[in-house]
């Protein structure tokens, strides 16, 4: 629009430059509200030659649905004009343009609305200006308009733009919408896929701010629910075959069967057409609100879309009078608007005489159409235009008009001196500035969040096939952002119809880890891709997809499935098991043999053989051997603190006394013969008192070494075998235990040495060879005992200990006393002084 100025710089005349846009719907009024609706979409690509003026863009599709939105705006404005309680002194008008869902077209249309376009002639009086614009539908288009119209402070109220980026009031202060922000839709989508266990989903979207922000939000939100994106792919607004091939290759190569698509229905048509040509099936589509109720997709692709789930804007129960308004079109009333003319011709497949339709989709077929008869009736055919069963976006348009009306009502009710502007002034409702509408915020904030977004409520829609093959959009749940987080999503599973399946499809990167295993993340892969690692021994996991295994308590252990802690079994050498019974019999037998020999020795105590071999020490040795045998019984059975405190000292003391007796017997014999040498006083040190003292000395030393250390005690050992509690006696002090064995070993070495020195003494008085042989067996047993004892655990350690005790005790008993018993009982003729004195 060009303006000529006079010398006084006052506006004299403005002339509209450029072609007049006749494709608009206009009604005059005191206040004209602008409107932008995507009546056409999917442009036909044409390469400019730059040699002639470009022709207007042509588009593939006409949207009857968007025409319903436009007609809802006109209906709402007419309804407000008819009301006496709302703006009674003002007449609202409208000026509506086709935005074609295209930024250049929408931007041109918005500038026409903001600056005004002469509908008749070129005088300045005929210029109509819109101070508020209802639109646009697309988020990307709305952002472009806001950046262009921002300096004019013209309010833009969108009915379908959902991008979360538009919630930034600092960047877009003049933007309002009756459509919830994608922030809430994304939360709902993340919860939806998590609800059905779809942790591995594909995410695709058109290259636009709407899809980019939505996918970015989804990737952030899905992490909280353990959902991962198998892939993210953006495709251009105008889908070429190359772009479709790239997209379909990604879908086919991925293992995910669930796809979330952020786009409009036009892009979805191209994608579905290619999927159909490739015969790709068994996909679960999740629709964004942009195409969640797009019934036009069902006609050709119903078999691919059956079972689709998507969140749609909350459906209005009804808008009284809207159905009648939509179907009141007649052939005589539609000639004034190219939009209505095109809709009529497309719906009834006819050609109007003198049609102003300039968007012929197929020129050849258009001129082949028969003329319209003039008897056509919208009530006789189905059209998305007249379908008021799913009033969602239409209801948003309706609310947007009333939003503006109530803001204007508040301006008109302003009282001078109490107004919201400078010095309490009020705005002139018939000549107000656009920014004054935005300044009047009270109604704008009703049922809205602080950033101007409406409170989110979505219907969860399931695409189902009706008996006649048509689309049946069934509400199977809802999402209400005003409810607590755990209750915001409600789904009725029984209402959902899955395509060719009885249950929801599985779409996971890794199967769930069953109880008894834990998740092990794969390095460099999403968190949904993992391996299931069995819990280690003693750890369990009783839940699916456990991140870690928990340790069982001290008295429990994991079962074979590793999903339950069960009481540990106990182990000790029992009297009731075979090995315990054998050792018990051997111990009792050894003690009985010792007592039997004592009886024999008592019975034959006056015989030379018994008297010649230090009878007193022999009796003591037999008693201590019997005690050694009986000590083995203390090692059998369930250990207790008192048993442990008794058996180890008893073992050490009894063997120390046995070796002390042998040492004393050898020393007596050796010293007896050595003392016959001239001037030898050795014998006086090995009398009966000295012999008793040597035994007591060994006993006292053992008592001090063993009993004054930390006492032995019972212990439940779980270190050797986790599933078993080994009840055992611990020595209390390892040093003390090995000192006892060392002391016994020293006594045995000294005894062996003295027996070796006595080897040349007369045989009849000499037990040295028997003692020497018994000591060799003793050494063999206990030297073997040490490595076996250290390398075994549990009841087998106890069995080894008992075996060592019994073997060494039997060696002493048999080597020293059996030969004597043989002579006493079987060879009594040799048990005389003469035989004994013989060399």
Image: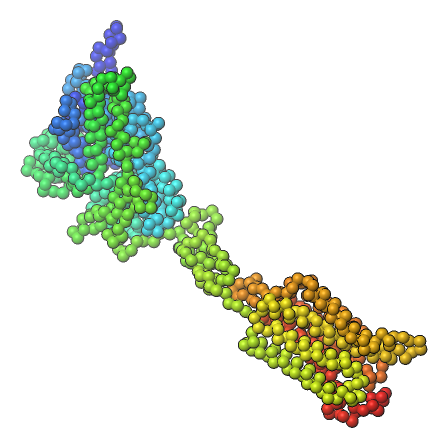
- Answer with left or right where residue 234 lies relative to residue 588: left
Quarter of the view holding residue 630: bottom right
Whether residue 15 is visible here, answered yes or no, is yes
- Answer with left or right where residue 401 lies relative to residue 579: left
Residue furthest right as drawn: 678
Residue furthest top as drawn: 7
The residue that appears at 26% across and 6% down in the rendered structure is 8
Q: Position of residue 564 (x, y in %)?
A: 44, 61
- Answer with left or right where residue 594 lies relative to residue 172: right
Q: On screen, 298 above or below 83?
A: below
Q: How many marks?
A: 0
Front-lying residue, 118 or 527:
527
Colour mode? Answer: rainbow
- Answer with left or right where residue 808 lies relative to residue 147: right
The residue that appears at 25% across and 44% down in the rendered structure is 459
Q: Position of residue 611 (x, y in %)?
A: 79, 85
Q: Position of residue 452 (x, y in %)?
A: 30, 31
Residue furthest bottom as drawn: 829
Whether residue 97 is visible here, answered yes or no, is no
Front-lying residue, 759 or 294:
759
Q: Which quarter of the rendered picture does the C terminus lie within? A: bottom right
Quarter of the view holding residue 341: top left
Front-lying residue, 148 or 15:
148
Q: Which quarter of the rendered picture does the N terminus lie within? A: top left
Front-lying residue, 813 or 783:
813
Q: On screen, 728 above or below 773?
A: above
The residue that appears at 32% across and 32% down in the rendered structure is 450
The residue that appears at 27% across and 40% down in the rendered structure is 457
Q: Position of residue 173 (x, y in %)?
A: 31, 26
Quarter of the view holding residue 808: bottom right
């Amino acid at each position: 629009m060009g303006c000529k100025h006079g010398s006084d710089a006052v506006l004299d005349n403005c002339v509209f430059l450029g072609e007049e846009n006749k494709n608009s719907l206009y009604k005059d009024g005191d206040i004209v509200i602008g409107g932008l609706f995507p009546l056409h979409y999917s442009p036909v690509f044409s390469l400019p030659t730059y040699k002639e003026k470009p022709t207007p863009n042509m588009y593939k599709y006409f949207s009857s649905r968007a025409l319903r939105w436009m007609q809802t705006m006109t209906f709402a404005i007419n309804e407000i004009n008819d009301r006496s309680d709302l703006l009674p002194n003002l007449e609202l008008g409208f000026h509506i343009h086709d935005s074609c869902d295209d930024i250049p077209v929408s931007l041109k249309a918005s500038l026409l609305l903001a600056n005004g376009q002469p509908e008749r002639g070129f005088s300045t009086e005929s210029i109509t200006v819109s101070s508020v614009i209802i639109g646009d539908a697309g988020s990307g288009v709305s952002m472009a308009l806001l950046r262009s119209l921002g300096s004019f402070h013209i309010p833009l109220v969108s009915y379908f733009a959902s991008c979360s980026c538009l919630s930034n009031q600092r960047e877009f202060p003049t933007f309002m919408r009756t459509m919830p922000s994608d922030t809430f839709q994304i939360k709902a989508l993340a919860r939806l896929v998590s609800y059905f266990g779809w942790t591995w989903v594909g995410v695709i979207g058109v290259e636009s701010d709407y899809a980019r922000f939505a996918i970015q939000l989804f990737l952030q939100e899905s992490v909280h629910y353990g959902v991962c994106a198998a892939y993210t792919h953006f495709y251009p607004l105008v889908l070429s075959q190359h772009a479709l091939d790239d997209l379909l290759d990604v879908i086919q190569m991925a293992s995910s069967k669930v796809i979330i698509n952020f786009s409009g229905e036009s892009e979805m048509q191209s994608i579905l057409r290619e999927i159909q040509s490739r015969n790709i099936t068994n996909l679960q589509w999740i629709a964004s609100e942009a195409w969640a109720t797009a019934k036009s997709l069902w006609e050709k692709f119903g078999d691919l879309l059956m079972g689709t789930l998507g969140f749609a804007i909350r459906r209005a129960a009804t808008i009284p009078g809207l159905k009648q308004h939509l179907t009141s079109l007649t052939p005589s009333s539609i000639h004034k608007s190219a939009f209505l003319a095109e809709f009529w011709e497309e719906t009834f497949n006819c050609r109007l005489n003198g049609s102003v339709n300039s968007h012929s989709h197929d020129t050849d077929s258009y001129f082949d159409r028969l003329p319209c008869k003039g008897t056509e009736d919208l009530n006789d055919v189905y059209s998305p235009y007249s379908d008021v069963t799913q009033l969602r976006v239409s209801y948003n348009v309706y609310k947007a008009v009333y939003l503006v009306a109530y803001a204007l009502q508040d301006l008109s009710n302003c009282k001078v001196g109490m107004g919201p502007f400078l010095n309490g002034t009020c705005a002139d409702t018939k000549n107000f500035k656009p920014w004054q509408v935005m300044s009047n915020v009270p109604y704008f904030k009703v049922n809205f969040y602080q950033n101007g977004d409406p409170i989110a409520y979505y219907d969860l829609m399931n695409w189902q096939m009706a008996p006649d093959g048509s689309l049946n959009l069934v509400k199977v749940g809802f999402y209400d952002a005003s409810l607590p987080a755990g209750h915001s999503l409600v789904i009725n599973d029984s209402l959902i119809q899955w395509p060719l399946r009885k249950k929801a499809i599985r779409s996971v990167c890794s199967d769930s880890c069953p109880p008894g295993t834990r998740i092990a993340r794969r390095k460099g892969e999403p968190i949904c891709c993992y391996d299931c690692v069995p819990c280690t021994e003693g750890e369990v996991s009783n839940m699916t997809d456990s991140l870690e295994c928990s340790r069982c308590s001290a008295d429990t252990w994991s079962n074979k499935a590793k999903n339950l802690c069960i009481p540990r079994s106990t182990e000790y050498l029992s009297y009731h098991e075979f090995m315990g019974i054998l050792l018990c019999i051997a111990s009792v037998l050894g003690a009985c043999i010792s007592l039997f020999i004592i009886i024999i020795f008592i019975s034959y105590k006056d015989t030379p053989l018994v008297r010649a071999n230090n009878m007193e020490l022999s009796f003591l040795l037999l008693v201590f051997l019997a005690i050694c045998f009986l000590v083995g019984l203390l090692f059998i059975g369930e250990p207790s603190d008192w048993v442990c405190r008794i058996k180890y000292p008893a073992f050490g003391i009894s063997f120390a006394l046995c070796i002390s007796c042998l040492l004393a017997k050898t020393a007596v014999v050796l010293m007896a013969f050595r003392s016959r040498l001239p001037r030898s006083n050795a014998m006086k040190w090995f009398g009966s008192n000295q012999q008793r003292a040597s035994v007591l000395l060994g006993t006292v030393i053992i008592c001090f070494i063993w009993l004054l250390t930390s006492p032995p005690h019972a212990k439940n050992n779980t270190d050797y075998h986790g599933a078993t509690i080994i009840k055992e006696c611990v020595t209390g002090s390892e040093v003390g235990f090995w000192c006892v064995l060392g002391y016994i070993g020293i006594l045995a070495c000294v005894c062996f040495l003295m027996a070796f020195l006595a080897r040349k003494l007369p045989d009849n008085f000499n037990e040295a060879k028997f003692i020497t042989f018994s000591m060799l067996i003793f050494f063999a047993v206990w030297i073997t005992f040490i490595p076996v004892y250290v390398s075994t655990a549990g009841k087998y350690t106890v069995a080894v200990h008992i075996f060592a005790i019994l073997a060494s005790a039997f060696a002493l008993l048999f080597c020293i006393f059996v030969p004597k018993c043989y002579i006493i009982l079987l060879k009594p003729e040799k048990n005389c002084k003469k035989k004994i004195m013989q060399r």
